Amino acid sequence: MKRIFVGLSLIAATCAFVQPAMAADDLLARAKESFKAIPTTVPEIADNKVTSDKVELGKMLFMDPRLSASHLISCNTCHNVGMGGDDNLETSIGHGWAKGPRNAPTAFNAVFNIAQFWDGRAADLKAQAKGPVQAGVEMNNKPERVVETLKSMPDYVAMFAKAFPNDKDPVSFDNMARAIEAFEATLITPNSKFDQFLMGDKSALNKVEAEGLDLFMEKGCVACHAGTNFGGEGYYPFGVVEKPGSEILPEGDKGRFAVTETADDSYVFRAAPLRNIELTAPYFHSGKVWDLKQAVSIMGTSQLGEKLSEKEVESITAFLRTLTGDQPKIEYPILPKSSATTPKPLEMK
Amino acid sequence: MKRIFVGLSLIAATCAFVQPAMAADDLLARAKESFKAIPTTVPEIADNKVTSDKVELGKMLFMDPRLSASHLISCNTCHNVGMGGDDNLETSIGHGWAKGPRNAPTAFNAVFNIAQFWDGRAADLKAQAKGPVQAGVEMNNKPERVVETLKSMPDYVAMFAKAFPNDKDPVSFDNMARAIEAFEATLITPNSKFDQFLMGDKSALNKVEAEGLDLFMEKGCVACHAGTNFGGEGYYPFGVVEKPGSEILPEGDKGRFAVTETADDSYVFRAAPLRNIELTAPYFHSGKVWDLKQAVSIMGTSQLGEKLSEKEVESITAFLRTLTGDQPKIEYPILPKSSATTPKPLEMK
């Protein structure tokens, strides 16, 4: 009997030693089925070759407040490259101090999303880039005025010609959008702790983070938040199981319904990409939730029909914090100087 | 007779050959009496040692919109490092889309000014930095709220401790201002064509530019616009000889009178520094003049009592364009992330 007990103890001790390594192997194998690491090189865009001339021009355009009617607001105002690629506001402030209807999504890793905006109404980043420039509550400009503005500056004219060498009329609203898309393709954040884990460094996640990853997959978060971007790949109703209150899911915003006009798409949104999520509070399309733990908890009840325990929420949140990658290094561009023919700012509300 | 003629011709030819060189020597000698080149190294600040830790912190603070009540407006909003250090607006747009009373001065080379603001009401850049953060029409914040915000972010706390190693309570409104001043001391623009000329490269100015410099000194512009910064060193009435119309010199803004309450200081302003002037339109404290030639012409009549000819205005303007130096190269800082205790933005007007 004693011998048996010692034998069992030995087996137990051996298992205790072996199991974590096996568990990590298993966790890694399962993670590899659902997720991809952010690449360390700039991804290709099917119909818009990313060249360094285009990226350099796109960076200028992204930072240039003269794309807005007021000359105050640039893409970077709401997609701040120093703040995780968004503005950390519930909803953005735009022309005339107007408040936008939805939380600004991050521009970082947006190139990996299936489509752009919370409702996916823009097929890609170049289609997206044209939206805020024209939206009355954002930059409030007109395409022809933007083109007139860009054509008034010889430095921009030269850069467009270089970036679009085969175009007869390179300074166009479309090419503005293409250049911005090319720049945004460089706004990727590789090398997160999770990506290190995914690429084989099993020590990259600590115990709690690994538990969080396990829960993220086991509980079903992964059903909507998978792929390279942990989301951004499909459309799902907010409140699959239980609709959150109207303070979080305002009744007036029916999401993708406005795009497809299909009843099934009421309160349907593109699943939020979760890369760098700890940098992009507040959360949800309404921007009403500032605490990541609260957001995880709400997702549990609304999407999974499960009240996650405090410990589970802690673990999942700890895991989500491992999705923060290297932030883009960007040298602030020296913008072309205005000329006598540059349209003047329209500051009025 | 023929010999004499040939002799005179020879002398004339010799003079024609020698004179420009002599004129350039003379021009350079006279310029050296009035002007100094922008240094290529960061200037010292008497009571605020410029350290790399302080500069790095100051750059973050300069770029951080969370210094404003709304979390939308940073120092860089109105002093854009990609646009000559200002916002290229008549007067700035601030909290709630309020319009400020005066044109935003450039932050570039501001360290060389005798005092800050158009009326010199701040003795130095650290005193200046505290103004816009609190002004209702600018960032609309309160010192205690700024400190609470900064203290809520561990990365800022660590950086303040590093930048101010001898302080018991390093995260303070004063130290915020000191760090911003240290960063702003790095915003200098050496190596302009004029500075190359001043340092002995007589070919750095072309004929028209050299004529412009000559006129700038001969006509008397140099009386107010001299030194390192071509201005920023003294206070003068706008309209020494002839007051411009109220569309350019609004009656309600009495300039330095508000600071000294001395009748003599009515409509007195700090002479505008002219470095990088081609990048900082529109001009004057009212920001009402967009064309540099028009600004030069107005200065002729209002300050010198002289109607400058079109050719003179052209030459002086060509010269002023040689004051554009190398723009600062700045890597966009990755800002500390907000925490649960970071005060939320106050977006309301």
Image: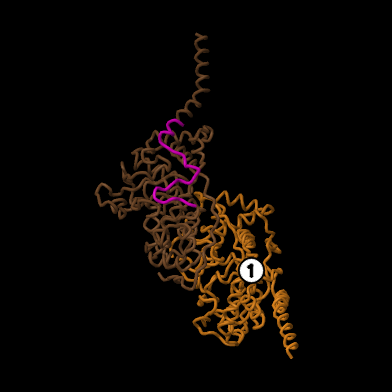
Chain colours: A brown, B orange
- Residue A12 in percent (x, y) is at 50, 18
SS for dot 1: helix
Report the residue at 52% width, 83% height from top.
B251
| Residue pointed to by mark 1 | B193
Question: For residue A146, which quarter of the picture?
Answer: bottom left
In this orientation, which residue lies closer to the viewer: B23 or B229? B23
* Residue A332 vs residue A153, the one in the foreground: A153
Outermost residue, bottom direction?
Answer: B1
**Segment tinted magenta in the rendering:** A28-51
Q: Is residue A80 left or right of residue B306?
A: left
Image spot of residue A275 (x, y percent): 45, 44
Residue B204, compared with residue A331, is above or below; it is: below
**Among all residues in the image, which is located at the extreme front?**
B2
Q: Is residue A36 above or below residue B41?
A: above
- Up-down: is A111 above or below B110? above
Q: Is residue A40 magenta?
A: yes
Q: Chain of mark 1?
A: B
Q: Position of residue B325 (x, y in %)?
A: 62, 66
- Magenta region includes residue B89: no
Percent x, y of residue A256 = 31, 50
* Residues packed near mark 1 inside 10 Å, few (<14), some (14 to 19) or many (20 plus): many
Q: Amino acid at mark 1?
A: Lys
